[in-house]
Image (spheres, helix red, strand yellow):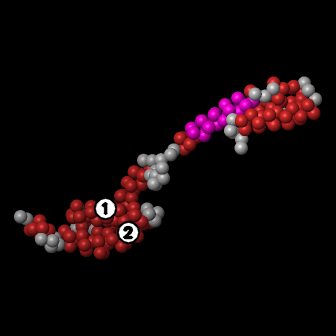
Amino acid sequence: MPLRAEAASRGLPTADEAVIRALYLEHAGPLLGYTLRLTAGDRSWAEDVVQETLLRAWRHPEALDPSRGPVRGWLCTVARNLVIDGGRARRARPPETGDAPLIGVADERAEDEFDRALLSWEVAEALGTLSPEHRAVLLETYYRGHSVAEAAKVLGVPEGTVKSRTYYALRALRVALEERGLVP
């Protein structure tokens, strides 16, 4: 059995573990501060980046050779690349949702449109119970948005007649809507 595997099986620290522990003790704090700035203060993301950076240092011990330059520079470069890759990955997929139910805006809009269509249908049926004169005056004043004077001109009746028909038409419409349970 190789010496490294034997030491690990007994629970003794290996040379790799000692190097990584020393690396962690010396560089983890400053590396976390650096990654916090890179991740705009997202602590959990920064901690993940530090952990992955140290894992890559463990996988590539040749990068820790002092003759290749300062170790912290290599660690910071790896951390920066991890943050850039993570940011790209986050932008490439839709944003994560919380624990809220997954009811989409489109579902709500469809439900609202369905409710509006049903209400329009009920109102149209209620309007159908009105006399033709009352329907005509409501059509001109409410649906077409004409003033009393404009409605009077279109209907060919005096303005006072438009006002009184509107009043009685609305009363009759309210009764018809109450019968259908649409108005309390």
Left or right for 162, reference 3 = right
| Corner quadrant of residue 37 | bottom left
The part of the image, by quadrant, that contains residue 34 is bottom left
Q: Is residue 40 left or right of residue 73?
A: right
What whole-number distance in Å separates the C-alpha atoms at marks 2 and 1?
Answer: 12 Å
Q: Residue at x 33, y 71 (%)?
A: 28
Percent coordinates x, y for residue 134 in the rendering: 82, 29
Element on which disc 2 rests: helix
120 part of magenta stretch: yes
Residue nearest the observer in this picture, 60 or 97: 97
The residue located at (42%, 66%) in the rendering is 43
In the picture of the structure, the residue carrying the numbered disc 1 is: 52
Q: Nearer the viewer, residue 9 or 100?
A: 100
Q: In this view of the protein, can residue 145 be seen by the observer? A: no
Type of amino acid under label 1: Glu
**Side (left or right) of 82 relative to 42:** left
Residue 146: numbered disc: none
Few, some or many C-alpha atoms within 10 Å of disc 2 (few <14, some 14-19, many ≥20)? many
Magenta residues, as a range?
Answer: 110-127
For the N terminus, the quadrant is: bottom left
Read off the residue under disc 2: 32
On the image, the x and y values in percent for residue 138 come to: 80, 32
Specify whether 106 is left or right of 49: right
